[in-house]
Image (cartoon, helix red, strand yellow):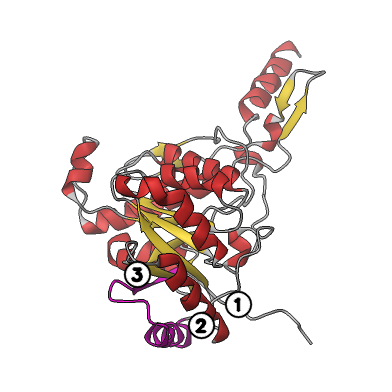
Amino acid sequence: MSTTAPFLPTLAVDLVTAPSLLPDLARLVRGLEQTGIGALTLSDGGLHPIHVAAHLAPLTRAVGLLPRTDAIYVEPFHLATQLMSLDHLSDGRAGWLLQAETDPSAAAAVGRAVLGLEATHREAADVLRAARALWDSWAPDAVVRDAARGVYVDASRLQYADVEAETFSVRGPAITPRSPQGLLPVLVADTDRAAVGEPVTSTAADGRVLDLDVSGGARAKPLAGRIAEALDAGPTDGPGRVRLVRLVGLDLEADPVGTLGQLAAELRSRDLVEPAPNPRRSLRARLGLPVVPFRLDPVRRADRARLARSTSTLEESA
């Protein structure tokens, strides 16, 4: 008989990254972590969510950190690298709430034409595919640090991303060694599903984020009903599975730590969200996602050009 505990979604709180939040941010986040909140999502309020998450990573021990950030009007290579770096900083607690920006000002800020909705959906899927290829471009044992030979990395344990999309191409490999989780968990919040589109939400994402608005008060009974309904009605696997329950609109002027401590305890007593996070478990494991092993593709090996040149030289000298 299996003794594996049933999967329960992680309870998360959304913080809007307004500059006014900074003076009390560290105290607030430490308090939330002590209450057993499982994750924080960071939504753009003026400061870049990835930058705020990177600031919080060394200040926390167990809470997951998921920036909600755009996949459309960005450089995929740089975005993937920033998320890998966050995973290193947090020791395997990073994730990505994939957002697809539809505001024309976002396109204008980077000098791009505004994409239509169908093109936006394709772009989101392409950027996610590129990010995962880059995250998976270093083997776990690629870094050898052999000072005697003057070799830092074994190039035969790296591989190119080789992504050709409609509007961009990414060759890779990444400039950052493989991060603790390898492939970071990528989730889509309810508020973003329409903009992100079916190719990601129904096929490519790792799971769904159930959004619960608590701006009118974080009362346990109605929230518990919403969570139970979503878990009962939703799939038990795949991109549509609820893996994160996100509380949005929290009143930070009141007593958020005390309020959320009581709410989290009540939801746990009803077996609706996971227990307080264990700092020794990766975010991916806590979200019920399997480890994805590294597989080296000989065609994509990063030393292939060197090998090709060596073969050509041998043939010419023969």
- Above or below residue 307? Residue 48 is below
- For residue 190, the mark is 3
Residue 126 location (% of width, % of height): 40, 50
In the image, which residues are magenta? 208-234
Question: Label 2's element?
Answer: helix
Q: Residue at x 25, y 36 (%)?
A: 110
Q: Quadrant of residue 287?
A: bottom right
Label 1 sits on what residue type? Phe
Q: Which residue is mark 1?
A: 7
Q: Residue at x 29, y 44 (%)?
A: 73
- Above or below residue 199? Residue 75 is above
- For residue 279, the mark is none
User: Which mark is in front, 1 or 2?
Assistant: 2
Looking at this view, is 249 or 85 the one in front?
A: 249
Q: Is residue 83 left or right of residue 23?
A: right
Q: Which residue is mark 2?
A: 266
Classed neighbour count for the residue bearing mark 2: other residues with Cα under 10 Å, few (<14), some (14–19), many (≥20):
some
- Above or below residue 168? Residue 237 is below
